[in-house]
Amino acid sequence: MTNPFNSPASGEKVIIEENLGELFMITPKSIEGDIKTIHGETDALVADVVIFRDGVEPEAYIGTRVFQKVLIGSLKGSIGKPMPVLGVLAKGEKKPGKSAPWVLTAPNQAQIDQALAYYNTNVVSNPFD
């Protein structure tokens, strides 16, 4: 008999550095602490992420971990809220001796419309279906 069960997953990986300037729709789920990385132990935000790129279908990543501290700070307040966070991935201002942080900037109206169309089609479901 074959195994009918799903295998456990640790989430899908989003490489932030490859998505500068792209539109992100992020649904923060939780904070995980004491995750072992090559840089030591750290915290991460677990989220469902949709990336919108020009000319291609949006890509959804379920249960991905966000390790960038400034992004975590801007997203953790939205854990448990009904609507996702929408923003364009950018680099913030570099401080002396530090790397420029990854931040989300405000989307334009066309980007909001694009994300809303995706959200209404793929995220919102009718409880009576």
Image (cartoon, helix red, strand yellow):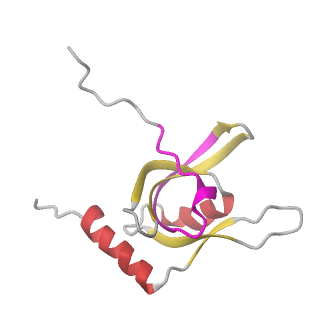
Q: Which residues are magenta?
A: 10-34
In the rendering, at what x and y percent does residue 14 appear?
Answer: 53, 51
Which quadrant of the structure image shows residue 68? Answer: bottom right
Q: Is residue 109 left or right of residue 121?
A: right
Q: Is residue 51 left or right of residue 74?
A: left
The residue depicted at 46 percent of the width and 66 percent of the height is 53
In the rendering, at what x and y percent does residue 111 appear?
Answer: 43, 78
- Quadrant location of the N terminus in the rendered image: top left
Which quadrant of the structure image shows residue 35? Answer: top right
The residue depicted at 21 percent of the width and 63 percent of the height is 125
The residue depicted at 45 percent of the width and 70 percent of the height is 54
Placement of 31 over or under 57, stated as above or below: above
Placement of 13 over or under 109, stated as above or below: above
- Quadrant location of the C terminus in the rendered image: bottom left
Residue furthest left in the image? 128
Residue furthest right in the image? 97
Residue furthest top in the image? 1
Residue furthest bottom in the image? 109
Q: Is residue 90 left or right of residue 50?
A: right
Counting the numbered discs, the total is: 0
Which quadrant of the structure image shows residue 18? Answer: bottom right
Residue 16 magenta: yes
In the rendering, at what x and y percent does residue 61 appear?
Answer: 43, 52
Residue 19 magenta: yes
In the rendering, at what x and y percent does residue 24 appear?
Answer: 49, 66
